[in-house]
């Protein structure tokens, strides 16, 4: 089988999520931990379906919380395009965590990262995209009192001081080994991981005492936090805890949803009709002909339509089971299932885009700047 790759900048191949846990040295969220989280966050779809499935030190952060030491949440976005549905997955979960634990959230926009790693984008572009992406975050309903969003270039006075403390403790050979940099990588990119580490210590710096930090993200970002966690004790901070989700697939049925493949990604800014068209062209697990599919059934395990229902759009487990069975028995044809999903996505986008427009007036309530 083709070797799969998962790094912060590249994801491809058929991902074996169990193997990733081994490769990265993280822990699976087992039944016991799932039960422990359930006390706070309820019977959450993303835990029940193993979408958030891996972690670092989640038990530790819950121990601290239960002893009265509150943590902060930290997550982020690399603003290289409009937001797509895949990005929303960790943000939905982050919002539910924020409400369940009643904690602050720091949201980093790495406008520097997307400038440094992308030859097409200027700093002005990544700045503008940061503000566009911030509308999506606000539209999800994060509470302004507890949620602060910042751009690396606009909050540099605070972040840079933390980042240089980190950078001083990370050698080029570590950066090369973790991220695969070479001698021709620009030096901004080599430094960048220190900027992504900095917010993990932000609350501790601002409060002048050690504050635990929990980072929800997809597993592609883990490399940054491996570096961050190695440096934390040297600087006298707690290691940040991390909780990882799987990657929402593209409409082509494999790889992750990625902004660089717009035809197989659904953006929150897509006109609902455009999104419908993309869904109608999606890869499915259907047979070559309707006749054959009626006889032999479809394969939901490789079908992007089925995956979209599972990851985001069908909340009801019984209905999910029914979709699966009907697909396998050849009772639910791909065209029909595409229509069902397209209806749900259109409905979601229409509502989201309304909230997104309203968010334009609220942006200043969230921004943190020097
Ligand atoms: P970025 O912009 O690539 O992704 C933003 C968040 O979405 C997750 N993600 C996905 N989740 C599910 N399915 C997908 N197809 C998918 N694609 C991306 C990412 O894991 C991330 O959680 N360097 C970061 C920005 C960042 C950050 C952070 C992310 C800065 N600080 C702290 C997480 C936590 C980036 O470019 O993310």
Image (cartoon, rainbow, N blue to C red):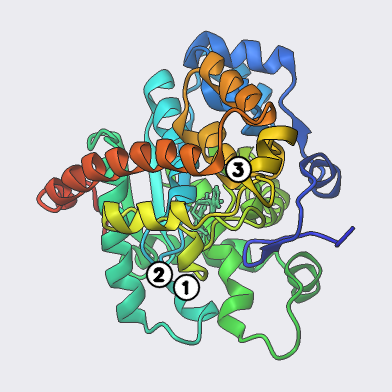
Of pointers 3 and 2, the one earlier in the residue sequence:
2
Is residue 324 shown above or below 208?
Answer: above
For the residues labelled 1 and 3, the Cα–Cα distance comes to 28 Å
Of pointers 1 and 3, the one earlier in the residue sequence:
1
* Quarter of the figure with residue 215: top right
- Check disc 3 and report the residue beneath it: 237
Asked if the beta carbon under badge 3 is closer than 8 A to the nearest atom of ligand 1, the reply is: no
Q: Are marks 1 and 3 in contact (CB under 8 Å)?
A: no
Q: As drawn, which residue projects farthest toward the bottom? A: 184
Q: Are marks 2 and 1 in contact (CB under 8 Å)?
A: yes
Is residue 89 shown above or below 185?
Answer: above
Residue placed at 56% from the left, 37% from the top?
Answer: 333
Q: Position of residue 211 (x, y in %)?
A: 50, 34
Under circle 1, the secondary element is helix
For the residues labelled 3 and 2, the Cα–Cα distance comes to 26 Å
Q: Which residue occupies the foreground of this view, 228 or 276?
A: 276
Residue placed at 43% from the left, 20% from the top?
Answer: 101
* Quarter of the figure with residue 110: bottom left
Question: Which mark is on residue 111?
Answer: 2
Residue placed at 51% from the left, 80% from the top?
Answer: 118
Residue 61 in sight in this render: no
Label 3 crowd bin: few (<14), some (14–19), many (20+), radius 10 Å: some
Is residue 127 shown above or below 292?
Answer: below
Q: Answer left or right for 369 relative to 249.
A: left
Q: Answer left or right for 356 relative to 8.
A: left
Q: Which residue occupies the foreground of this view, 318 or 231?
A: 318
Under circle 3, the secondary element is loop
Q: As drawn, which residue projects farthest toward the right? A: 1
């Amino acid at each position: 089988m083709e070797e799969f790759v998962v790094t912060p900048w590249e994801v491809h191949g058929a991902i074996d999520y169990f193997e990733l846990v081994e490769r990265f040295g993280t822990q699976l969220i087992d039944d016991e931990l799932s039960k422990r989280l359930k006390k706070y966050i309820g019977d959450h779809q993303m835990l029940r379906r193993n979408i958030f499935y891996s972690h670092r030190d989640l038990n530790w952060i819950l121990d601290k919380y239960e002893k009265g030491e509150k943590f902060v949440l930290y997550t982020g976005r690399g603003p290289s395009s409009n937001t797509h549905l895949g990005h929303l997955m960790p943000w939905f979960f982050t919002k539910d965590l924020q409400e369940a634990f009643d904690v602050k959230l720091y949201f980093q926009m790495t406008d520097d990262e997307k400038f440094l790693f992308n030859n097409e984008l200027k700093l002005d572009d990544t700045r503008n995209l940061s503000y566009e992406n911030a509308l999506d975050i606000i539209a999800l309903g994060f509470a302004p009192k507890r949620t602060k969003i910042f751009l690396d270039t606009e909050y540099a006075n605070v972040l840079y001081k933390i980042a240089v403390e980190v950078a001083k403790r990370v050698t080029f050979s570590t950066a090369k080994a973790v991220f695969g940099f070479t001698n021709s990588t620009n030096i901004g990119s080599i430094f960048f991981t220190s900027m992504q580490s900095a917010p993990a210590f932000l609350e501790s710096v601002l409060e002048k005492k050690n504050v635990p930090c929990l980072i929800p993200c997809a597993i592609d970002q883990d490399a940054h936090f491996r570096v961050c966690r190695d440096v934390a004790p040297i600087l006298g901070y707690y290691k940040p805890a991390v909780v990882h989700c799987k990657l929402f697939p593209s409409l082509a049925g494999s790889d992750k949803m990625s902004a660089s493949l717009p035809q197989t990604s659904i953006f929150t800014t897509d006109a609902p009709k455009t999104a419908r068209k993309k869904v109608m062209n999606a890869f499915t697990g259907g047979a070559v002909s309707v006749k054959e599919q009626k006889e032999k059934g479809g394969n939901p395990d490789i079908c992007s339509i089925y995956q979209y229902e599972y990851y985001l759009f069908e909340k009801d487990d019984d209905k999910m089971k029914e979709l699966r069975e009907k697909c396998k028995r050849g009772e639910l044809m791909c065209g029909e299932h595409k229509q069902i999903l397209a209806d749900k996505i259109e409905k979601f986008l229409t509502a989201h885009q309304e909230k997104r427009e309203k968010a334009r007036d609220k942006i200043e309530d969230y921004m943190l700047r020097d």
